[in-house]
Each structure stands twice: as C-alpha cells, then as structure tokens.
Amino acid sequence: MTRIFDDPASFADDALDGFTAANRRYVARVDGGVVRSTEMAEGQVALVIGGGSGHYPAFAGLVGQGLAAGAACGNMFASPAAGQVYRVARTANNGGGVLLSYGNYAGDVLHFGQAELRLNAEGIETRTVLVTDDIASAPIDQLQNRRGIAGDLTVFKVAGAAAEAGLNLDDVELLARKANYRTRSLGVAFEGCTLPGADQPLFSVEPEHMSLGLGIHGEPGISDHPMPTASQLAELLVSKLLEDKPDDAGSRVAVIVNGLGTVKYEELFLLYGRIETLLATAGLEIVDPECGELVTSLDMAGVSLTLLWLDDELETYWAAPADTPAFRKGNVAARPHRDVRQLAADTAAPVEKPTPAAAVLGANAVVLLDAVRSVIIEHEAELGTMDAVAGDGDHGIGMRRGIEAAADAAGKAVAVSAGVDHVLTAAGEAWSEKAGGTSGALWGSGLIALAHSLGNRESYGPQDALSAASAFGTAIRNLGKAEVGDKTMVDALIPYLDAFSEHLDNGATVADALTAAADAAATAAQETAALRPRKGRARPLAEKSVGHPDPGAVSFALIAESVAHAVRDLTTEKEYAHE
C-alpha cells in the first residue's frame, strides 16, 4: 500500500513536483506534465507520451534525450485532460510536429484525441500512434482493440530514437506503427495494487494463485490459475507470446521482463534466465534485453513479458542511445539546457453581459452542481468498488474530482456575474481538466454542450430544457461512440432522455418530467448488470462484469436523481416566494 502522502487527492501532482525537483537535469515542469529540459534540434519531431500516474518509470521517467520530448501525466490511473495534453505538446513542439503515443484506453483516446484536434487547428501538425500490445485484452484478429501495457516502452523507444536522429514526422510515425504491430505482451499478478489513501487493493488473488492477463490500471486478470514455479511461469508467458507473433516475425527479438511494482529484482532476474533459455531453444536471438521495473502499477505484485520482433531498421532505433531519468542506454552527448517557460494563457474572450433570465439560471446551475457534488461524495466509495469489479476502481474518485472542480468553477463564474452559458462552460472545462479519464471527457463535453444550447436568452421554457438535455446527450454519444447495450453511461442516458421528452410532451412540468426521467435512468442503470461490456476498460473482463451494474450508468442515475430533487426544491421556493 502507499504509505507516504499528505492528501490522496493531490498525490499525483505532489509526486510529479518532487520528481521534477529530483531530475531537473532532464525535465522541467509544465501545467499537465513535464517536458525535456535539454535542447532539441530545430525542427525535431516531439514525441509526447502519457497517461495516468502510478506507472513510473512510465511516463515522466521516459522524458529525455533519445526518447520522449514530453509526458502528459493524469491523476492516479486516469487519463490526463485534453488541456493538459495540449499544454505539454505545445511546449514540447520544436517545429517538427508532434507525435502523440499512449496506451489504448478509452479515456486517453478521448482526451489525447481532443488535444490532437486543437493542435492541428492551430497549425502544429500532430499525429497519434496507439500502443496495443496486450494479447490478453483482445484476439489477434482484433489488434486495434488491445490495451497498451509494457509494450509502451518499445514503441516510445523506437519513435523517440527516430525523432532524435532527425527523421521527419511521417517516418517517425511509420516506425512507431511498425514497432507497435511487432510488439506483444502478457502479464500476471499475484496481488492487486492499492490507491493512495485506500486500505484495500483494487482486486485480490486467492492464496497460492495468480491472475493472468492483468491490466496496468488495477484491472484484474482475465483468469486465475494455481501459482506456478518460475520455470512454469516462463513457459506460460513465452508460449502464449510465440503463438501470437506477427506474421512477418523474424528471428531477432527485444525482450522486456517488467516488474509491476513489488516483485523484487532478484525474482525478475531469475525469471529472465528461464525466459532466455526458452527463447534460445525456439531459435530466437535476443537483442539488448531489459529486465526491471519499466511500466508499473503502483504496488502491484506481478510481472509481464514483452517481445518486440526486430528487423534491421527497428533494431537500429531500439539499440540507439538514450538518457532519461529512468531509462539509459549507450552514451549520449550532453546537451545544454533550455529555458522552459509556461505557455502564456490564452487571452480570454470578453464575457457577454447576461440577460436577467440567464443570470438567474446561472445561479440555479450552481445550486444544481452543489447538489450533484453532495450525492457523488456520498457514493464515492461505492462507485469505486463497483468500478473495481472489471475496471481500475477510480470512477468514484474521478467523479468527485470532476464535480468538485466543476462546482467551484461555476461558483466563481456566478461571482463575476456570468450567465448560465458561461457558468456551465466553466464547469465543463473544469470537470474535464480535473477528472481526467473517460468520465472527465464525457461530462466536460456534455456540460459545455448544455451551456451552448441554453445560451444567453431573454427567457427560458420547458422546450429549452429539452433542447439542452438533447444537446448533452448528443455530445456524450458523439464523443464516446457508445450505443445502448454497450454497458456504459449511455444505457441510462437514453431512457432518461426518452422519459424526459415523453413527459414534457404530455404536459408535465419540468420538475415532474425530470423526476420521471431520473426514475427511468435508475431502472436502466440497474439493468446494465445483465449486459456484457463492449466499450471501455471493462471490455476485456466482460465475464467478471456480468452481474454488476455499470458504474458510469449508476453515477449518471444518481446525478439525475439529485438534479430532479434540486429542481423541485427550487421550484417550490419560487412558488413560495410568489405567495
């Protein structure tokens, strides 16, 4: 468990500050992560990597010469927000364009994708290469659906070395894609990891057993097995990876035996020895192996094996020198340090004076967000436990970080006389920024769409409420690409919208329609227990998820209920004031 911390909610930021202080010869802190503190060649491609915190040396520890130009670092096991990725990438950019690379997780895809769109819109050419090396998370004919685990390192190393060598963005991207295609990984866990401040691991393994096919965000494996000997474990890992090798595999491989946080180095070395023998017997030549902690999962007791099948081109960049806080290879000539300064804040657009109706609705929005904050805080632990069944257990803390930031931002907006559009826009941006992960991207985008729909009008009626709710739903579906039956928040959202529309059309008040819609969402959320997930981190653990409701759908239903109650209270107060 994590023992050294002040506030669990700020653990990731506090650790990143300390990491930067200890490694100023390599990195400089920016809002959202770190960038290289050493000079880069003019026009050099900037490789920007990232993901949730809790995986050191990934991701900040891999920033430096011959590897990444920057790393965007989210909260514990949660994607960095789009704004964080954008700020890191914009600072790291040195005129050659940006290559974003990260593990294939829903929240990362959403946030990095939004940052990529923004960077390209500003004229900074930006591409993306997802890492999809985990053979346990999808079959070989669905490589694009696989997660990224310790194979992150092979892709990052090849791309970073190619960028350092002066290759252009097209060539660096092609090499990264080739490295990803030829990389395979598989891991096992003997015990789960524990988030800072928690007193229980995210999952447990039966004594004398191991969990095969774990994720690196605290997700349990896809199946449990009796504890093997070192030789048996080596045989299992090697045989599974050789069965899954790429169709153009040669006879040379880069090997990574990776400790996930608690397994001692002597154990890793013992395992590596068994693995080397098996690979040699299979006729494979090992090139520049790595054995140690490279992509961890806090204090998880576990190991993974990664194989990168090399060709001459990939071998050149895999073996090229690198010098970072946590990964060093060969000899790198020292580079002078540069002055890395925080990007100047964008000039804020002037806030339009709100109409009286928009000002009142803005103040009401703060009341509603405060009600949502209360219900999320009340159910934070429950949502985390629910998420840990087939995910990483961070849904509760992520939702709390999001709503607390949103409610605070909304309150500040009202304090400077903003209307409902600016209040909800500020709330949405803050939610996305502080929550990270899939839920942060979805709720942030949804609130901003709600704000744009309501606008700054002279008056508001029931149809405006319906249009705003529809805009919220459209934003969620367009961004998340989920449909009913995928076992996501959408399974509660669509029944909610249908019930809201139906009751308004039948003459119900907004308060009554919201109550009926909340009831429909609550029922639908519980019914997700029967579904198998087809989206998100729970998908690889579909069987474990069956019988448990989706945490995103449940949190939406809780929020819907709290909003309905708060609207009814506001309506009652208004009626009382008119008596």
Image: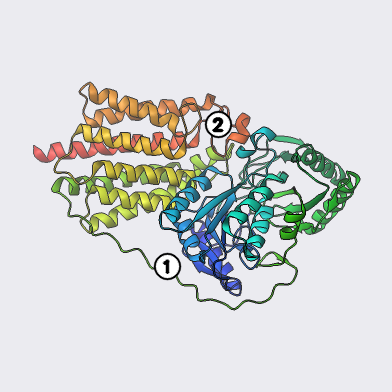
Residue 572 position in % (x across, y down): 19, 36
Q: Residue at x 79, y 42 (%)?
A: 237
Residue 196 visible to an observer of this rendering: no
Toward which corner of the image does residue 270 lie, by quadrant? bottom right
Amino acid beneath label 1: Leu
Q: Nearer the viewer, residue 25 or 98?
A: 98
Q: What is the quadrant of the C terminus in the image?
A: top left
Q: Earlier in the sequence, mark 1 or mark 2?
A: 1
Mark 1 or mark 2, whichever is nearer to me: 1
Q: Which residue is mark 2?
A: 534
Q: Does 8 appear above or below 304?
A: below
The answer for how far apart the CA atoms under marks 1 and 2 are is: 39 Å
Q: Which residue is mark 1?
A: 343
Count of marks overlaid on the render: 2
Residue 452 visible to an observer of this rendering: yes
Q: Residue at x 37, y 65 (%)?
A: 345
Give SS at disc 2: loop
Residue 75 position in % (x across, y down): 52, 54
Q: Residue furthest top?
A: 506
